[in-house]
Amino acid sequence: MKRCLFMLCLSFVFVPSAFAQTILLGEQVKGGEHFRCELELSVSGKLKAMRGGMVEAMTISASASHKYSERAENVDTVGGIGKAIRYYDIASSTSKVGLESTKRELAANRRLTVAVRSAERTLHFSPAGPISRDELELVAEHFDTMSLPTMLPNKEVKVGESWAITNDAAQHACLFEGIVKNELQGTLTEVKDGIATFTITGKTVGVELGAAARVSVNATGKFDVMAKRIIEMTWEQDDDREQGAATPATEVNAKVVLKRSVLVEEPEALSATAREKVPGDTVPASMLMLRYSDPDGKYSFTYPREWHVIGRTSEHLVLRLLDKNEFVAQATISGWKKAEAGKHTPAAEFKETVSKVMSWEPEGIVQDGELPMEEGRWMYRVAMKGKQEGVAVVQNFYLIAAANGEQAAVSVMVPQDKIAKLATKDVELLKTLELRK
């Protein structure tokens, strides 16, 4: 009898703890809440580039650090943060491709940024004005903390139970522009000392800049049961991306370690005064422009995001124009001999020079003449049709001169069937070109 009573007491002791493993695993963010996020990224792998008709693999290694305060302005229809205002204390990265090393850091006057999340993408910009492509990548290509609430099932879950990660959550977490296949699955693995541990594992396929990307995920998250917030995440993925119109093929392993906390008080950097320049629902086009400054101080310009810098040497800068990730045109900016102040190379001399370019087969001039510019600047264009590696193209050759005599030559190659998509986008780009030296 004593043994039966003892076993009965044990059952009352252990049964409640078993039921306690069922928790409400969900996060409900409200507009006006603030979070502190700290992320550390490490990447290793290889980049595959075509050189001389052969695929050349180069090793890649990179690391990045981001520390920022994030204000949730509103919540979107799937439960994620729809619009966030961020202030970055730190946003920097170092990378090495082959023997070439690069360091990036967000400019001090661009540390206040805005992120607007939609089903298609998350749009990032700074209210202070145009940011560079490097700065855009720093703030737009780290782990998407706005989508954290969408990774949870938002229902009662017991230890060992799994749920499907939605397409929306998978797309934003893997930095896809579109989702093709999603097999990611979340599982609650433990509840201890008020912290619920869950995993996200599986494979997913998406599209980024027109190229297919295959990702395998192995992630672990920590959920504060009382606060009802994700407070930690270690997200590791094996990433295989094909070559796109503006990006090389890569095979990398990426690991992100995130620490996240709720801020009780509003940070001064995100105060009402600091937010005065943040636009409402309509974002001015000027805030969405990107800026480029030549490292040697030769020139600078602003440009729409559909233009992508794909290569730079001491002599040339190469950009590609994409329309919905489809190649439209390629522009190459080169230096040109300096003229006397207030003068420029004669148009006839420039036209004769470009007609002798040997890298393509010119067939005839389509049009040529000066283009209207603001006072003190001059632009001339000669457009020729011909063939580039057997493809019918039009080459627009531009000569641009500043009041100080500095000059630049620009060639824009566009397939003849894409001329309508190019329209005047090359001219609009070049009108912002400022020649400095």
Image: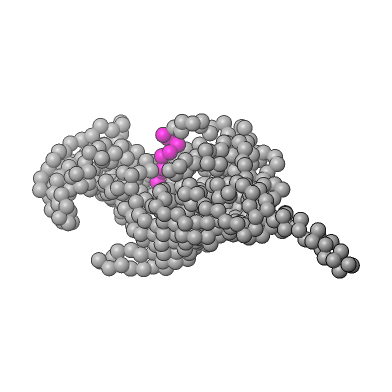
Residue situated in front as seen by the camera: 286 or 368: 286
Count numbered badges in the picture. 0
Image side of residue 120 versus residue 142, left or right: left
Image location of residue 266, percent across then percent down: 67, 38
Quarter of the view holding residue 426: top left
* Chain part drawn in magenta: 285-293
Quarter holding the N terminus? bottom right
Tell me if 234 is positioned left or right of 394 in this view. right
Furthest residue in direction left, as rendered = 363
- Residue drawn 64% across the image and 49% down it: 156
Judge whether 220 appears above or below 54 on screen. above
Q: Is residue 200 visible?
A: yes
In the image, 58 versus 210, the foreground residue is 210
Q: Residue at x 30, y 34 (%)?
A: 376
* Residue drawn 72% across the image and 58% down it: 18
- Residue at point 60% right, 46% down? 154
Residue toward you, 332 or 154: 154
Residue 325 x %, y %: 33, 48
Location of residue 84 (image quadrant) = top right
Q: Position of residue 229 (x, y in %)?
A: 65, 48
Residue 97 in sight here: no
Asked if 423 appears above or below 354 in the picture, the reply is: above
In the figure, is residue 407 to the left or right of 1? left
